[in-house]
Image (cartoon, rainbow, N blue to C red):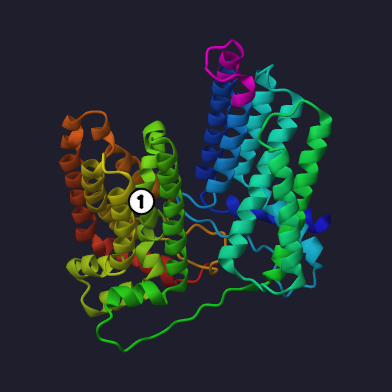
Amino acid sequence: MDLILYSCKARLNSYFRQKKVQRVLLLMLGIVLSGFYAWLFTFLLQQSQEGSFEFGIEKMLGYTNLLLLALTILRGFFPAYIPKADFINRIYPVKPLKRFWTELVVELVSPFYFVLLNFLVLLFLMSPDYTFLHLVQSFLVFLTAHVTRRTLQLFIERKINWRSSMFVGAVVMAGAFIALQARAPMFEPSYTFLMLVVHLASLGSFLTSNYFLEQAAHEPKRRTVNYSSDARRSLGWRLFKNHKMGKQLLLFGLGFKVLMLGIDATVYMAKGIHMLDKNMSLWLFVGPLVIYTYVFNNVWGFYKSLWLTTERATGDYKEFLKASLMPLRMPLLLDAAIVLLYVALFNHEQATFILLMYSAAVLVLTPIGIISSFTSPKMVKGGILSFSAKTSYLYSFISIFLLGLLFLPLLHPLLYLVYPVVIAMTLFAMVAVLREYKQYKYKLFETLYKTEA
């Protein structure tokens, strides 16, 4: 217990060690927003109870739990990937089970989870339709989503011994969890304590599976660099292939995009409608946003050797512009290929809009990524297992906002006039930042190379 309390205290101190005032204000904003959404969901539950919607109160509660499940999982992968917190070093003489529980609890100590829990408690206090049983069930859904996220992170970050008994045990317990979920889905509202016991048993089997998987995936994936003297292979390909962390994040982001577009394609083939038309926020995955928020809003943090080489060679902002585009070529080509395949097979109706939007998004997000890399660099440290931010949160949200402006033509074709305005503004801002490079290079060097105290 002392180890858990100490670890939680250290985790909280790490959040507020730097930019304390800014982070406290962001936490307060999150609490205010949780209150607003609690009021909004209370209103929606009341309207469902009165029959204002086609679906009843049970469906509304189920949708609330599904939203909670989706947000908790997506928080780790969008707009940027957050690696699993390896808080206790493996060389410490701590028993595996104790380490597992400590890290699990420490991961829950974060502002995001605090705001989410605050939303659930306020919803319980505000809405008479959201009972104590529903609160407990939502908490179980939240824990299940967190364990799901941990499981996905283990597959991404660790080298798994597929033949070990621990992995077999993980598969068996995961099978028990899936079987229980097939019989009684956790997101559907419960009205008896017996059903909560079933959900608790389901969560217990999933936690056991996660523990076994962690023991089977003890060794982290090692970084390897493969050099090639083949002149036919471009420098952009080598920069993509030889940067293990950047490649891993980009491939995961592209895989996540394929998953979202694949779900839309499946719905279209089954029902003849697009999820994109029902939920406008899903259009974000059609654009190239993910490769920028994962890596290229901090291109010099990932490719600091390229920056230093360019600085020592010329120091000219035109060369920096060329150098920042080289690592982008291969990921952007893969992302564009995914979108073209999706358009060709599943979305002919919106082909003109998607292609124009994608082209404009590249012209908007690339300057934003260059600006972010110069003005708000972050040192990429700790390897893939660290839980430090890899790109600027501020510029990630700016990227999302600007990409959102490019969806305005869906409302009316005349709003295509927004495109040249947004593109011109971002290009002008990029040129202004590049001209002031001499003022930013000292901050870049300090951030990328100077050892933290």
**In which quadrant of the rendered view does residue 123 lie?**
top right
Query: Is 112 positioned to the left or the right of 212 in the image?
Result: left
Closest to the observer, 251 or 23:
251
Q: Quadrant of the C terminus?
A: bottom right
Q: Which residue is mark 1?
A: 289
Q: Look at label 1 and name its amino acid.
A: Leu
Residue 273 place in picture, x, y as percent = 38, 35
Q: Which residues are magenta?
A: 44-59
Q: How many marks?
A: 1
| Image spot of residue 52 (x, y percent) | 53, 12
In the displayed structure image, the side of residue 308 where residue 415 appears, left or right: left
User: Could you say where residue 376 lies in the image, as x and y percent from the top left?
Assistant: 38, 56
Say whether residue 275 is left or right of residue 200.
Answer: left
Q: Is residue 317 above or below residue 338?
A: below
What residue occupies the far bottom of the structure in this picture? 229
**Quadrant location, the N terminus:** bottom right
Q: Is residue 102 visible?
A: no
Provide residue 107's location: percent of width, then percent of height.
66, 52
Point 52% across, 43% down: residue? 21
Between 439 and 105, the residue placed more toward the observer is 105
Q: Is residue 52 magenta?
A: yes
Residue drawn at point x = 74 percent, y = 44 percent: 180
- Callout 1 environment at 10 Å: few (<14), some (14 to 19), or many (20+)? many
- Toward which corner of the image does residue 416 lie, by quadrant? top left
At a point 73% along the width and 73% down the height, the residue shown is: 164
User: Image check: 145 left or right of 239?
Assistant: right
